[in-house]
């Protein structure tokens, strides 16, 4: 491959991916940088676009390069770039907002409707040899950090944002539903922030073990009991399910001696039963954060939310200061996201990497794709 | 056809001003807008540069166009502009932030270290014919507002920033404002619009206090004969204005005067908020023990941030704040120098200079 080629992993249409070549990006604006991509982690959203071709309003209408959890080495910088030099290793924050709209001007750039977000149609992602972005969205990595760690800063940043939205503080009790990569990282960030107790919830024993014994990000773990199958095979009613969720919340409170309940509950599953249990579990006056994405509409315990004066917030992507904090947490060793990596592939094996995430299973957690080798 | 001249009012050195034809600005970014300036209010900072040629570290080292409180009409738009169109009346937010630094990304762009602010050296101000500004700093004015009122959006935005962002004034609050100049008066007006229960204006100028009482204050206090002892002065002011026991919820200093700041700290209730809006001496004798033991929230307030202009324009549009009655003098562009000369006293509150296009003859053609 010559230095003018830009090998890329392209999603042409639903379930149709190919290794191809796209034009090498050029510096256009004074704040542009070109990064030679070093490592890329795969996220559920990448797989979702591949399999379904849309998430909400974002619809795949033309081919895009996939990938958005990346790191790399700076190879070219625009005339106004002061924070980076050629050769710097960087973590790449994959969404550059417009900088002009009311959301950007007021500091909520994660809500900018004109964000150029890697691998959200129609924008190309980072699974190319070279990727162009804005210099203030690249964060230099200290010498000792690997490019793999740098790429893992993206899910860490998601977790940092979730904890920022939830206002997680030292001394709090925090319960996190879901021990996938995001759930585990949220638990890790909460611990790093000095939470008194962090409890991880999942239905998979091996995931719970990751939380309690491998990452050691949870002080306690729990697999919630599900309603037994009815002898006549009929489904439970909405009310029966809701009642069960409330019972499970009480079991969690009792099991872990959470008293009035955790001040912060975070759902990183998107599953209705977890959302219901989570809201029931939250201490009066506490905060519930929706981080996981499942069905668009769920049966929600709204009266409980009302009478307990709960603050219910959504969390999406990241805001100012979050990515640098993620880099710090990893650089200092307080968070060790490389423990989440279960599979590593070379660039040419990208489709295999995606297939690994798609089939899933208990042995698959975070899958990494190396950048193009020279 | 000869290109139109951009007649500008320039400060060369202290008290040495004149008119110059400057090149008309060009749109260089697709989000930029060209505006014909119609009305510009004069601010204390403009007058200070006129008299002294500097404010703190900011020094006028080369000729600089004065003025920054302006409103105008859109005459040209860049290809990506969507929020305004030719012919729209707009209020100018005259400080362009860098959009890349942590302050900008956090939404507190008024603190951007690379801020390019009109008439703060070395950046030219708005006392000219045509001015270029990115669209997100051009705030559309409803047709019901005059361009003079539009120019008042700038100082009103300063007051909005003080009272809403920094002081967080709410319904029923008792507010004391030191200084009844334009900013102090507008702070009183914003407090009233947001339902403050008591608004006390303090000054040493009786004419300004009479105006304040008609305008927005519930109580006015002439502090000329107050004790030099700050706690005594505070007690006298609170007593005369019947401030609630314990103290005022909010005190704003819009004077920059040390004795006001000192008395003000003693007037705030425990747990209350003091906002420093006025600029006087760099260092003052400050009642720090009172601040500590009363657990006060002491904040600075600087210019304006996201949403402040929109709020100010809404306040004018809905009649909640009257800015027109603060305009005491309107001066044609060619008399700009006289306006600056006459600014060091008198009964005027806000002087507005009309744009060159409002005159029948350009001053440079005289």
Image: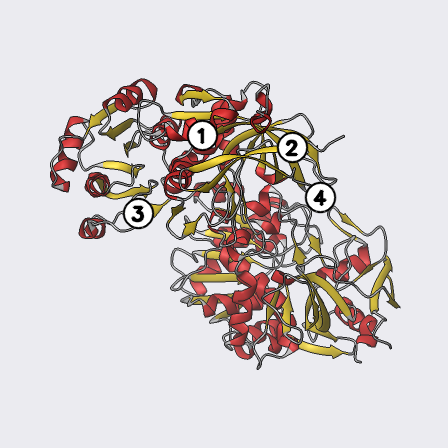
For the residues marked 3 and 1, what is the alpha-carbon distance in whole angstroms? Answer: 38 Å
Instruction: Judge if badges 3 and 4 mark residues of a common chain.
Output: yes
SS under mark 3: strand
Upstream in the sequence, badge 4 or badge 1?
Answer: 4
Judging by the rendered image, the residue that carries numbered circle 4 is B30
Mark 2 touches mark 3? (CB < 8 Å): no
For the residues marked 4 and 1, what is the alpha-carbon distance in whole angstroms? Answer: 35 Å
Mark 4 is surrounded, within 10 Å at the Cα level, by few (under 14), some (14 to 19) or many (20 or more) other residues, namely few
Judging by the rendered image, the residue that carries numbered circle 3 is B298
SS under mark 1: helix
**Whole-percent x, y for residue A60 in the image:** 82, 52
Mark 4 touches mark 1? (CB < 8 Å): no
SS under mark 4: loop
| Chain of the residue on which disc 4 is drawn | B
Mark 2 is surrounded, within 10 Å at the Cα level, by few (under 14), some (14 to 19) or many (20 or more) other residues, namely some
Judging by the rendered image, the residue that carries numbered circle 1 is B337
Judging by the rendered image, the residue that carries numbered circle 2 is B5
For the residues marked 4 and 2, what is the alpha-carbon distance in whole angstroms? Answer: 23 Å
Quarter placement of the N terminus of chain A:
bottom right
User: Which label sits in the foreground, 4 or 1?
Assistant: 1
């Amino acid at each position: 491959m010559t230095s003018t080629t830009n090998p890329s992993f392209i999603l042409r249409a639903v379930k149709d991916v190919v290794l191809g070549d796209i034009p090498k990006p050029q510096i256009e604006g004074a704040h542009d940088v070109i990064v030679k991509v070093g490592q890329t982690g795969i996220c559920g959203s990448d797989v979702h676009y591949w399999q379904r071709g849309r998430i909400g309003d974002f619809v795949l209408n033309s081919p895009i390069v996939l990938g958005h959890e990346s790191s790399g080495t700076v190879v070219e910088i625009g005339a106004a770039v002061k924070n980076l030099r050629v050769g710097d290793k960087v973590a790449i924050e994959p969404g550059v907002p417009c900088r002009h709209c009311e959301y950007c001007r007021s500091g909520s750039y994660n809500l900018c409707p004109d964000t150029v977000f890697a691998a959200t149609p129609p924008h190309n992602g980072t699974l190319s040899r070279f990727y162009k972005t804005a210099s203030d969205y690249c964060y230099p990595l200290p010498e000792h950090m690997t490019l793999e760690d740098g790429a893992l800063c993206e899910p860490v940043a998601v977790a940092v944002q979730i904890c920022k939205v939830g206002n997680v503080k030292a001394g709090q009790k925090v319960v996190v539903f879901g021990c996938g990569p995001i759930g585990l990282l949220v638990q890790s960030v909460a611990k790093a922030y000095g939470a008194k107790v962090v409890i991880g919830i999942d239905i998979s024993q091996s995931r719970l073990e990751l939380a309690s014994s491998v990452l050691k990000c949870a002080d306690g773990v729990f697999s919630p009991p599900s309603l037994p199958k009815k002898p006549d095979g009929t489904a439970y009613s909405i009310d029966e399910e809701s009642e069960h969720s409330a019972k499970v919340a009480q079991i969690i409170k009792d099991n872990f001696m959470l008293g009035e309940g955790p001040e912060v509950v975070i759902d990183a599953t998107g599953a209705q039963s977890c959302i219901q249990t989570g809201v029931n579990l939250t201490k009066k006056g506490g905060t519930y954060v929706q981080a996981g994405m499942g069905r668009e509409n769920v049966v929600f315990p709204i009266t409980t939310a009302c009478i307990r004066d709960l603050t219910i917030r959504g969390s999406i992507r990241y805001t100012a200061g979050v990515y640098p904090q993620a880099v710090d947490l990893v650089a200092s060793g307080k968070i060790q996201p490389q423990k989440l990596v279960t599979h590593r592939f070379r660039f040419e094996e990208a489709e295999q990497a995606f297939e690994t995430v798609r089939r899933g299973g208990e042995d698959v957690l975070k899958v990494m794709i190396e950048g193009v080798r020279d | 056809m000869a290109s139109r001249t951009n007649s500008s009012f320039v400060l060369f050195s202290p008290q040495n001003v004149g008119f110059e034809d400057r090149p008309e600005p060009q749109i260089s970014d697709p989000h930029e807008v060209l505006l014909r300036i119609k009305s510009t209010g004069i601010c204390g900072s403009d007058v200070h540069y006129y008299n002294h040629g500097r404010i703190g570290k900011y020094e006028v080292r080369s000729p600089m166009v004065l003025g920054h409180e302006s409103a105008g009409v859109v005459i040209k738009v860049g290809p990506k502009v969507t929020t305004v169109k030719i012919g729209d009346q707009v209020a100018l937010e005259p400080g362009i932030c860098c959009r890349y630094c942590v302050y900008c990304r956090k939404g507190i762009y008024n603190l951007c270290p690379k801020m390019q602010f009109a008439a703060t050296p070395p950046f030219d101000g708005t006392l000219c014919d045509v001015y270029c500004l990115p669209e997100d700093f051009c705030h559309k004015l409803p047709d019901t507002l005059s361009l003079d009122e539009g120019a008042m959006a700038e100082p009103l935005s300063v007051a909005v920033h003080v009272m809403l962002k920094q002081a967080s004034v709410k319904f029923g609050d008792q507010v004391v404002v030191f200084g009844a100049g334009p900013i102090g008066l507008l702070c009183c007006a914003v407090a009233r619009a947001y339902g403050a229960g008591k608004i006390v204006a303090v000054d040493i100028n009786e004419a300004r206090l009479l105006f304040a009482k008609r305008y927005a204050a519930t109580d006015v206090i002439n502090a000329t004969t107050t004790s030099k002892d700050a706690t005594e002065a505070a007690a006298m002011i609170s007593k005369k204005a019947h401030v609630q026991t314990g103290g005022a919820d909010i005190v704003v200093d819009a004077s920059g005067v040390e004795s006001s700041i000192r008395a003000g700290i003693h007037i705030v209730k425990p747990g209350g908020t003091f906002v420093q809006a006025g600029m006087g001496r760099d260092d003052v004798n400050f009642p720090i023990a009172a601040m500590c033991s009363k657990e006060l929230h002491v904040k600075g307030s600087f210019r304006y941030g996201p949403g402040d202009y929109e709020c100010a324009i809404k306040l004018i549009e809905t009649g909640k704040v009257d800015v027109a009655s603060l305009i005491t003098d309107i001066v044609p562009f060619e008399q700009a120098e006289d306006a600056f000369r006459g600014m060091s006293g008198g009964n005027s509150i806000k002087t507005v200079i009309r744009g060159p296009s409002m005159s029948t003859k350009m001053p440079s053609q005289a």
